[in-house]
Amino acid sequence: MFRRTQMIKASSLSSAARTQHVFGLVSIIWLTSAVSAVGEAVGVQTIPRVVAHCGDNVTLTCDTSSLRLSDITLFSWVGTNKTLCEYNGKHDPEVMCESTAETTHQKLTLTLINVMPIHHGKYLCKVRSKMGVNNNSSFVTIQDCPGSSGSFINETYAGCFFNGVYPSGTVHWFQGDVDLTESASMQEVKDKHGRYDITSTINVQKGHLTQPYNCSLWLPHAKKYFSSKQLPMVGESGRSSGRSSGSVAKLQWICMITEMVMVKFMM
């Protein structure tokens, strides 16, 4: 009789434990569903993808629905690892920020000024209110940056430079139909805006200046040439307008450096 009583008590405890466990699971599922439903109630609309060129101004808009201004505790744009724009008027000095308030509709507009490759990436609009939390994103893609280009040549070597270009590429060399790219050398430097300064040089073969050299910037991802330069012919005598080949080379280098400095100053 005693053992039977113990078995009944154990069965009762086990049943109670199972009931409590089931109740706990139901509570978790209900709470999760409730939070999800609240999050969905806070509508957030953004432009999924924006394509821009270097120097453009890019405007990103974020709209919320079913929200009154008094219900909002956080409304902001986040990008490039920092908060750029907030509904309360605070914003990064390098961007423009504008907010619009209606009865149940709020808008936060972020404008990126003079976009560069460093602005490429994901921008997240965050909303937190008494009704819940939600977010949505816009992805900004920066396309071709034309930059500037130039070339120089003397009896010893020839060179081309492409400054402030994006994306990066490879310089191809030709003389007529002959591909000379493998015999050229190239240097690449990335600037603070995410653009590239690319310089390529090639040795000039004496007695082979029967055709002009041509250098072109090849973009592998686009499978196209971005910019091309045809270098002027250089006489085998090494003289041009009474100047020696050394003087011509020195003058060309001075002109090239001056042009690069001027381009950097203007940009």
Image: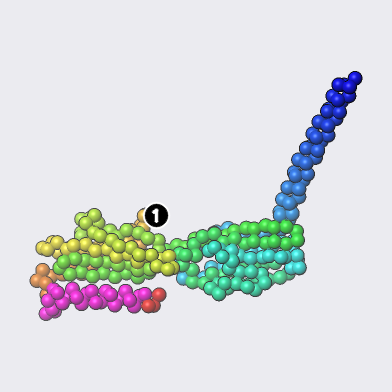
Quadrant of image for the C terminus? bottom left
**Percent from the top left, x then y, of residue 97?**
60, 72
Residue at (26, 69) in percent of width and height: 151
Residue 45 against residue 111 in the figure, above or below: above
User: Mark 1 = which residue?
Assistant: 221
Residue 145 in view: no
> Which residue is painted at 10% across and 68% down in the image?
236
SS category of the residue bearing label 1: loop
Residue 185 at x, y percent in the picture: 25, 60
The residue under the point 58% across, 68% down is: 84
Dividing the picture into quadrants, the one containing residue 78 is: bottom right
Confirm whether the magenta stretch covers residue 118. no
Task: Name which quarter of the figure residue 68 lies in.
Answer: bottom right
Residue closest to the eye, 265 or 50: 265
Q: Which residues are magenta?
A: 240-264
Q: Is residue 72 left or right of residue 152?
A: right
User: Image quadrant of residue 155?
Assistant: bottom left
State the residue in front, 195 or 153: 195
